[in-house]
Image (cartoon, grey):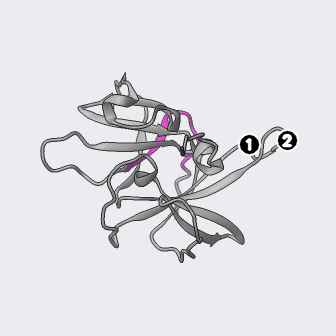
Amino acid sequence: MKTEHRDWTRANKAVVAMMQAKGDGKKDIFFLFTVSQVEEVLSEITVRAIPFAPDFVEGMCCWRGQIVPVVDIEKRFGFSGREHSSSDRYLVVRTGALDSTADTQLLHGVFRVSGEVKVIGAGAESSIVSPEIIGIEPSLARGTFQQKGNFLIVPDVALILQNEQKTDIL
């Protein structure tokens, strides 16, 4: 039996997760991650709530013996809350280097996304767009693009997992 080995860590591959499709003629929005950021895609997890957590933090889960936060990435980006469904997926995402030093650390988090998650080639034509056009906070994204009439958001995973965004609450 011949097995095929695929090197998903190549620079020309990306993982995209579609946000819930907009029906009324609006463009679809996708979250874009590098293949090396995505450790695993899960269809089910057990989430334990965290009292007084921000509304986008669904709680914590145990993944491979580690306690990691579970974030509703659509809520984190300020998109209206939607009903969760059985087709939702959970992306276990990491940031930082595997050989972390004192300056960097390896962080893991779980992002809840709509059901469609796929690996794509990153070579298609796209153009840079302003985050404000999509309606997101610029500090949360490392980049925003338009491709074939749809929007792609590259989340700043480290910022989201460390919750370092400074917001004025007064």
> Which residue is disc 1 drawn over?
97
User: From what the image shows, is residue 18 above or below residue 89?
Assistant: above
Within the magenta stretch, is there residue 8? yes
Other residues around mark 2 within 10 Å, as few (<14) / some (14–19) / many (≥20): few
Front position in the image: 18 or 24: 24
Tell me how many marks there are: 2
Front position in the image: 146 or 54: 54
Question: Which residue type does callout 2 highlight?
Answer: Thr
How far from the left and from the top, in percent, is residue 37?
59, 46
Q: Residues at badges 2 and 1 in contact (C-beta under 8 Å)?
A: yes
Q: Which secondary structure, mark 1? A: loop
Which region of the structure is painted magenta? 6-17
Image point 38% across, 25% down: which residue? 130
How far from the left and from the top, in percent, is residue 109?
60, 57
Give left or right: position of 40 versus 77: right
Image point 15% across, 50% down: which residue? 23
User: From what the image shows, is residue 138 above or below residue 41?
Assistant: above
Q: Outermost residue toward the front?
A: 170
Residue 79 is tagged as none
Q: Which secondary structure, mark 2? A: loop
> Which residue is disc 2 drawn over?
101
How far from the left and from the top, in percent, is residue 78?
39, 47
